[in-house]
Amino acid sequence: MPLDRSPPGRRTTGRITLSDVARAAGVSTSTASRALRGERAVAPDLIAQVQAAAQRLAYVPDPAARALASRRSDHVAVLLPLLSNTLFVDLLEAAQKALRSQGYQTLMGVTHYDRQEEEQLLRELLLHRPAGVLITGRDHSPASLELIAGSGVPCVHLMDLADASGPLLSYSVGFDQAQAGAELTGHLLRKGYRRVAFAAAQLDARVMQRMSGWRRALQAAGLYDPTLEWLNPAASSLALGGQMFEQIVQQRPAVDAIFFCNDDLAQGALLCALRRGIRVPEQVAIVGFNDLTGSDQTLPPLTTVRTPRARIGEAAAQMLLGLIKGQTPEQPQLDLGFELIERGSA
Amino acid sequence: MPLDRSPPGRRTTGRITLSDVARAAGVSTSTASRALRGERAVAPDLIAQVQAAAQRLAYVPDPAARALASRRSDHVAVLLPLLSNTLFVDLLEAAQKALRSQGYQTLMGVTHYDRQEEEQLLRELLLHRPAGVLITGRDHSPASLELIAGSGVPCVHLMDLADASGPLLSYSVGFDQAQAGAELTGHLLRKGYRRVAFAAAQLDARVMQRMSGWRRALQAAGLYDPTLEWLNPAASSLALGGQMFEQIVQQRPAVDAIFFCNDDLAQGALLCALRRGIRVPEQVAIVGFNDLTGSDQTLPPLTTVRTPRARIGEAAAQMLLGLIKGQTPEQPQLDLGFELIERGSA
DNA sequence: CTGAAAGCGCTTACAG
DNA sequence: CTGAAAGCGCTTACAG
């Protein structure tokens, strides 16, 4: 006599289902469903009974069934440009943690800074009817924006706040990139540097915002010179930072400080300076951006702007969770600020 | 007169469904389903008709419905210890890419090297009835192993190959960590170093395997000395590498080479040496492991072992994809090797 | 506040 | 090789 007495014809999974719970609690599945989801309009004692039964049977709802019936899954799509920049990994990790604690699974997508790829990814991920989407930046194709809007899925943008020209009815968590760029440049000016170059790679929207801050600060000081901009569309890396540093120092010996748009470039520059015997900050000052791993270990330690990406990831997740529940955030554009970290390089 | 003429009572999503396709192709949904999934036992001409209809209607199957009906989703769970080590991010990115190209979504889980957390994560992820799981290493709790086995979901282990003592009936893609440790140590010995320390953090299973390789090589040369082992359970980092380097150099001045179990430690040591004015490799040689970003940029460039993590992630995904289709891999334990990279530090 | 019933969009025995 | 029907495990109008 087998212990497992599942009815003959049934295609049973062996899984505890909602009707098992309902039966054990002596209610209908509708009531059990409502009780478990904390939907109001269920008598308190029934709620208790159902919860007890669920607990006792170790019931766990089936995500697929729930998604199919409610047309909304427990997934959240998270779109990032790259995984090779720890910045985005920090964002991802923090968001994922917050999401997971509320029972949501992260579906990540890597766009490689490509709007086409982002669009395609969005199309795929939206098929899963995610409960929400978290997307990096504000620079998306019209089609992408339409996909999101058309899906009716709540969305929070990461890193950038809306610019004045942007759509007003959207949510974001980040900080003012231009302001950070301006303040870092201001620091350099206060230290007495006069010919401050801006060196950047990747050239995504955020980098350009930092550049505009740099420009604004120099213009205000009457020190702006367009030939001090060094822009390279290639991917950011230590090696590229070294190359750019050499170029700048060689072609523009009068430059007394360099603002690299990202710490990896700055770290590479520092290494290159060491190799070439160029003293930092005596001969040329160097600053970076983001305060990535290792920037406190370089020689000299790197002066940079610390960006709150873990807090951004987490706060954005919380905002999204609220939107999913139908709450309107009191601050649709959440500015988490940044911090100037003065170390030895400038 | 509204364009959208969906029948009044229906709770329609507006989505194109399989029955739309079936109707358009003039077949039953069963046949449409089979034709689309390439299940045999469908007449060739019907297959063509159905595919044409699906194409024309831009039909995309609903993942939730499919998961519910087939009791298998299009998710693949990928368990990683950490995201803060680029090693694992490389693994993730490569696996995700391969999986996605076949229509599978990655559900990642971060275990923080904690077997309890891994178990919990597995429990959660298995609820989604993933089509497969990719899991780092071979050091799992018995309960975790049981969860995987009990779920019937195919699983491939990443990074480590099975040790002789391990279960035979399992799949893995990686390389021989002990062998790599031994060869790197052999390189040091051939260069004439005689007192080779082993410095490690994190102390996960793979690190210990590298250490056993180091020990084996030294023993074979009659040079093994247990007091040359420096083990620190803390997380690996540049800063810790610097600290360990200082300790070793100070407490054991006779040490002429140090094998750091990971490049970040070695990079930190190199930076520390620069700060302290200790010449590498003249006073002490340094080698790392993994060939992480920046190891070719340090001063001097770091001698290390390049590990094929992108290839591992991709090959593991392919093996898993095969298993999902019911294929048995010709090589259950796929050894992808490693490469000694000799640069300036040793 | 509660329940019976329909429905979400697929897959899969089963019968032919 | 093909189709009608049941079923996967939930949610949600609808009626009371």
Image: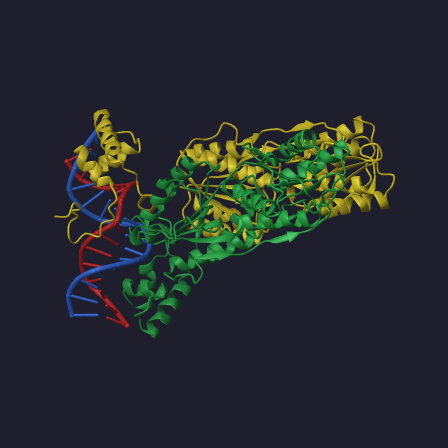
Chain colours: A yellow, B green, C blue, D red
Q: Residue at x 38, y 67 (%)?
A: B51
In terms of depth relative to the viewer, which is nearer, A102 or B249?
A: B249
Q: Is residue A275 left or right of residue B268?
A: right
Q: Quadrant of the C terminus of chain A?
A: top right
Q: Is residue A247 visible?
A: yes
In terms of depth relative to the viewer, which is nearer, A118 or B85?
A: B85
Q: Residue at x 21, y 40 (%)?
A: A19
Spot occupied by residue B129 in the image (x, y as percentages of width and height): 35, 48
**Residue at the outermost right position:** A254
Q: Is residue B14 left or right of residue A97?
A: left
Spot occupied by residue A218 in the image (x, y as percentages of width and height): 79, 34
**Residue at the outermost front position:** B222
In terms of depth relative to the viewer, which is nearer, B100 or A152?
A: B100
The answer to whether A299 is drawn above or below residue B108 in the figure is: above
| Quarter of the image where one finds residue A28 | top left
Q: Residue at x 31, y 51 (%)?
A: B71
| Quarter of the image where one finds residue A55 | top left
Query: What is the tally of numbered marks visible in this picture?
Result: 0
Q: Is residue A287 visible?
A: no
Spot occupied by residue B140 in the image (x, y as percentages of width and height): 41, 42
**Residue at the outermost left position:** A1
Q: Is residue A75 left or right of residue A194?
A: left
Q: Is residue A299 left or right of residue A155?
A: right
The answer to whether B167 is drawn above or below residue B44 in the figure is: above
Spot occupied by residue B247 in the image (x, y as percentages of width and height): 66, 30
| Quarter of the image where one finds residue A310 | top right
